[in-house]
Amino acid sequence: MLSKKEKIAYGLGDTASNIIFQTVMLFLTFFYTDIFGISPAVVGTLFLVVRVIDAVTDPIMGALTDATHTKYGSYRPYLLWLAIPFAVISVITFTTPEMDDTNKIIYAFVTYTLLMLVYTAINIPYSALGGVLSGNPNERVSIQSYRFVFGMLGGLLVTSCTLPLVKWFGNGNNEMGYQLTMLVMSCLGVVLFLICFRYTKERVSNPPHKLSLKTQLHVLWQNQPFKILCMAALVLLTSMVLRTTLAIYYVKYVLGKEDLITEFVTLGMIGNILGCACAQPLSKRLDKKAAYVYLQYISAILSCIAFFVPNEHVLLAFLVYFLWCFFTQMATPLLWAKMADTIDYGVWQNGLRLTGLVYASIVFFIKLGLALGGAIAGWLLAYYQYQANVELSEATKNGILTSFTLYPAIGSVLVALIMSKYSLDNRTIKKITADLTQKSNL
């Protein structure tokens, strides 16, 4: 059993990561369109193009971490090495230089690419670290629950403080406000990454092997539960990011309550935190696979309900969004615990523990979903003829409403259907764990 202190320390690493991850999900599209001055269509293309680079860098980073062996372990050292570079590039990304439109687009492409590269380099080893803190399947759910509770606390910090800090630091200059706000948050992230590094310990050994990356990927692709998780992660993040990206536009233009944007996204983040906290007790009562499928259907229903909430019923709109965040994020620790289960399945299947590569590959599909969700949001805004800071037509408002509610609901249903094919239920995991324990004792 891990101590609460170590679980909290691990969770603080995700607080640091989420300072950037949630800012990208919630504010980067809005920053690019309304502050930086790039068209929504270009923003959508930007998000998608960078994923092509991730297709190469993610598996390389996963294999690199598996091959890393230091006195600190295989994954922890990257938190120490990359905390400061991550902070610096985060600030640069949210900096608005004086230049023409073409150079602004180039600047956005270069800085966003660098941000995603360094995010890959620090987040993949951090994610893999969660799989080697303990070999106990039940303990892994607890670890991931702590992770995402503290990760969402980072998101709460972003939702509740970003716009007020932008206003306070900028004093009418939003460009300066965003830059200084990211400077403060990035410095906090450095401290939290270092705490995570200092107070965690790798316990599940990762035996060295000499297989090429191509061979490792071939072996990994024989892991059927792993492939299902990849597909589920892709669809899940696409629909989730589409919804969270459009939350600001929904409040500002559909509800007509621009002054309540911070309250809306903050309430949603509180729902995220409470949902993550409830994942562990839920996993004790229901099979992890079944619970995950049920939660996706509930999320879909709530998204559909939001479509029918009248614009003037602001409190009801807030409540439905809170409930959607609660049930959607209750599933998140279960998904990440399943990743470690697929690693054990791979060891049971072929004797190879490819921890870093598994997390890198699934994180790639998560980031691809992040990009697709952001890209689709940008393209939909362009399709519905959105223009920043002007009175929108009813057709544009209805397009934002539909994109915010019904399209993500379809995504949740697809995730549920995909996960219904997942074979590692609790009974199977217990058998695999028992077999691996018996082999290690021989």
Image: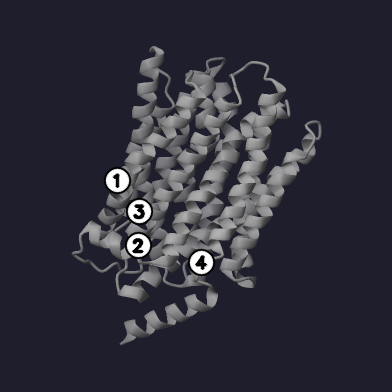
Q: Earlier in the sequence, mark 4 or mark 2?
A: 2
Residue indicated by mark 2: 221
Residue indicated by mark 4: 422
Tags 4 and 3 in contact by the CB under 8 Å rule? no
Q: CA distance from mark 4 to mark 3?
A: 25 Å
Q: Amino acid at mark 3?
A: Pro
Q: Amino acid at mark 4?
A: Tyr
Disc 1 secondary structure class:
helix
Disc 3 secondary structure class:
helix
Q: Nearer the viewer, residue 174 or 209?
A: 209
Horizontal and vertical percent for residue 51?
38, 40
Q: Earlier in the sequence, mark 2 or mark 1?
A: 1
Relative to 282, is 30 above or below? above
Which tag is nearer the camera, tag 2 or tag 3?
2
Disc 4 secondary structure class:
loop
Mark on residue 125? 3
Disc 2 secondary structure class:
loop
Q: CA distance from mark 1 to mark 4?
A: 27 Å
Q: Amino acid at mark 1?
A: Val
Neighbour tally class for label 1: few under 14, some 14-19, many 20 plus, Cα within 10 Å: few
* Number of dots carrying numbers: 4
Tags 2 and 3 in contact by the CB under 8 Å rule? no
